[in-house]
Image (spheres, rainbow, N blue to C red):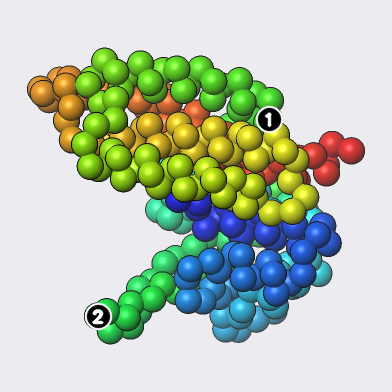
């Protein structure tokens, strides 16, 4: 959860473009990021994959007024509305973008291409029909912020109890990466997002850091399989809260616009 999901970049900058806050070129550059290229496959009216600029323009003409993020996990269809085929693809990818205003959704498929030493990443977004219905289990920004405060306390308590408070080179590297991300702060969301969304996203990323430390920084004090299972169980609701908050932050521009 430390890295920004591709669905988050597509939704954030796609929403900024739809709102007229950024140019198509700036939006595409931000969405692609460090990847080599993004294409959209299955877009209505197109027989072959097309570039993001054409795809975002076509979605607008199809009636799309906003883009929402879904970050589902097994047993938790966060941000999804169906049908089952789209939900299955989104769950496999662990992320998706759901269009608001027209029944389409986008699921990324990531490829690595090129020779050793010069590998680059290409992304194909598969455009599929979705059910136009309220997304599953997405809180408001206010709800997400309140839940995150409690989740931070819970995550810190779990880390301390399991002797995973953040020691060793792996933990230090994770903390350094988080601090560098935090310093960039307001770059993580596109122009037009409310300040509260930026704050919620930053808090959600902090929760993600703590969960990552617990999951990846060795067994710590959890020396038995039973203790390791207890650690995973204790962190599961914390991780879920962090994902819910990420989705709330990315979706906030659409929710704010629709509430006016």
Residue picked out by circle 1: 140
Residue ID at (62%, 26%): 145
- Please tell me whether mark 1 sits on a helix, a strand or a loop: loop
Residue ID at (45%, 42%): 179
Residue ID at (67%, 38%): 197
Residue 123 in the figure: left or right of residue 147: left
Among the two numbered marks 1 and 2 on one chain, the one whose residue lies closer to the N terminus? 2
Q: CA distance from mark 1 to mark 2?
A: 45 Å
Relative image position of residue 90 (x, y in whole percent): 48, 53
Tell me if mark 1 has few (under 14), some (14-19) or many (20+) residues whose alpha carbon lies within 10 angstroms of its own.
some
Relative image position of residue 256 (x, y in whole percent): 80, 39
Quarter where residue 258 is shown: top right
Residue picked out by circle 2: 116
Whether residue 205 appears in this view of the structure is: yes
Closer to us: 110 or 29? 29
Relative image position of residue 187 (x, y in whole percent): 62, 52
* Whether label 1 touches label 2, CB < 8 Å: no
Whether residue 134 appears in this view of the structure is: no
Residue 19 in the figure: left or right of residue 116: right
Q: What quarter of the picture does the N terminus occupy?
A: top left
- Please tell me whether mark 2 sits on a helix, a strand or a loop: loop
Residue 240 in the figure: left or right of residue 43: left
């Amino acid at each position: 959860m430390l890295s920004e999901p591709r669905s988050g970049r597509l939704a954030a900058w796609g929403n900024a473009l739809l709102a007229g806050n950024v140019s198509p070129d700036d939006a595409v550059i931000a969405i692609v990021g460090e990847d080599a290229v993004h294409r959209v496959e299955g877009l209505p009216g197109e027989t072959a994959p097309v570039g993001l600029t054409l795809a975002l323009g076509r979605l607008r003409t199809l009636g799309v007024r906003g883009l929402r993020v879904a970050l589902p996990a097994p047993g938790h269809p966060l941000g999804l509305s169906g049908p089952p085929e789209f939900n299955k693809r989104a769950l496999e990818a662990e992320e998706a973008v759901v269009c608001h205003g027209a029944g389409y959704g986008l699921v990324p498929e990531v490829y690595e291409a090129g020779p050793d030493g010069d590998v680059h990443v290409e992304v194909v977004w598969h455009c599929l029909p979705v059910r136009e219905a309220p997304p599953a289990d997405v809180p408001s920004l206010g709800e997400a912020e309140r839940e995150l405060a409690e989740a931070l306390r819970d995550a810190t308590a779990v880390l301390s109890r399991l002797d995973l408070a953040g020691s060793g080179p792996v933990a230090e590297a994770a903390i350094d990466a988080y601090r560098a991300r935090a310093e960039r702060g307001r770059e993580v969301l596109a122009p037009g997002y409310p300040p509260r969304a930026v704050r919620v996203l930053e808090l959600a990323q902090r929760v993600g850091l703590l969960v990552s430390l617990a999951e990846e920084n060795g067994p710590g004090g959890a020396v038995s399989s039973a203790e390791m299972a207890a650690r995973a169980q204790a962190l599961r609701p914390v991780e879920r809260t962090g994902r819910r908050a990420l989705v709330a932050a990315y979706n906030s521009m659409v929710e704010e616009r629709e509430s006016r």
